[in-house]
Structures are given as structure tokens and as C-alpha cells.
Image: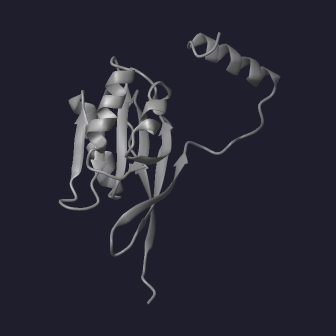
Amino acid sequence: MLELMEIKAIRLDIPSGANIILGQSHFIKTVEDLYEAIVNTAPHMKFGIAFNEASGACLTRVDGNDEELQSSAVNLAQALGAGHCFVIVLKEGFPIHVLGRIKEVPEVVGLYCATANPVEVIVVETSQGRGILGVVDGSSPKGVEDAAGKEWRHRFLRQIGYKR
């Protein structure tokens, strides 16, 4: 029997000055383990985490150390409506500071994006629920880096402390 499905693009509203990390995991313990991974790696970072439970009560579980960012994470997770996805909204740091630790969290299955860019999440909806197919992160390339672009990149990375 052929089941109907609908594919949607859902634009995520990232708060000004924030980054998000969007991923998939598999267990209710996700929010607590992500919380510990972030505070143990970047204790100065402000963040909120929301995780859409996919069985049992099917609640959006939430944690973090900033109420506004927690609320934003919940709004994004609920807009997606996909089971077993998590959204981290963070400020006062960048995803690169915590991505390694997040990837090591046993419940984390994979990551879709870590960005401050405008992002659209492509979801599929069936009679069972929603799932994430992928993301559109930012804009399409407009050309190829030239010597001036390479020099700018090198200078910028050193200016923000990522390279010496």
C-alpha cells in the first residue's frame, strides 16, 4: 500500500548573535548528557537544549543555563516536530568549541548543522510523524576564492584566535 507523505522546508529563526546545532539522538538521557558535555567543555557558554522524545510521552525535553535560549530551543524543536532531534541554541561561544564533545555523547546519532546562517530544515511528514531529511545552511556559492579572498580568510582566522 502506498502511503502519502509530505515534504516541507521549515525555516529556523535563530536568535540574533546566536548559533544553533541541530542533530539526532536516540534516548531521553540526551538533554542531560548534552548539558554536561557543554558545561564541562565551555563553562562560559550560554545555551539552551531541546530534545523531541519519539516514544512514551513524546515530550520536548529541555535543559540549559539560559532561560531565553532554552525557550528558543524549544520553539525550534517544536517547529520541526521531528522525533529524536535536538536543537542547541548557544551564545558567548561558537559550535566549534563544543562539537567534538557533542559528537562523543553516546546518544548522539549524527549532526545536521552547526550554524548562525539562515537555515531551512527539510522534513518529511508521514502518518507516523516527522523526520529530518537534511538542511539548507546559508546560501549557494557565488564564485571561487581568489588570492585576496585567501588572504582575507587567513587574516580573519588569526584575528579571531583560531590560527597563529
Q: Which residue is drawn at 46% across and 24% down?
A: 97
Does 45 appear above or below 18? above
Q: Can residue 72 be seen in this view?
A: no
> In the figure, residue 4 lies in which quadrant?
bottom left
Query: To which quarter of the image does residue 14 belong?
Result: top left
Using the image, determine if residue 19 lies above or below residue 77.
above
Pick the quarter of the image with the C terminus: top right
Quick check: can you spot residue 141?
A: yes
Lateral position of residue 45 relative to residue 157, left or right: left
Q: Viewer-proximal residue, 58 or 37?
A: 37
Q: Residue 70 in the image: state x and y as whole percent.
A: 25, 36
- Which one is in front, 146 or 25? 25
Figure colour scheme: one colour
Count every numbered label the image shows and give the total: 0
Location of residue 13 by image quarter = top left
Q: Residue at x 43, y 72 (%)?
A: 6
Image coords of residue 104 (percent x, y): 44, 37
Image point (37%, 64%), residue name: 130
> Between 124 and 85, which is closer to the camera in this rendering?
85
Residue furthest out toward the right: 147
Question: Picture coordinates of residue 105 (x, y %)?
Answer: 39, 39
Measuring from the top left, give residue 55's x and y in whole percent: 25, 62
Q: With respect to residue 130, does 109 lie above or below? A: above
Split into 4 quadrants, where in the image is the N terminus?
bottom left
Residue at x 33%, y 72% (from the top left corner): 128
In the displayed orientation, state which residue is furthest to the bottom. 1
The answer to whether residue 96 is left or right of residue 24 is: right
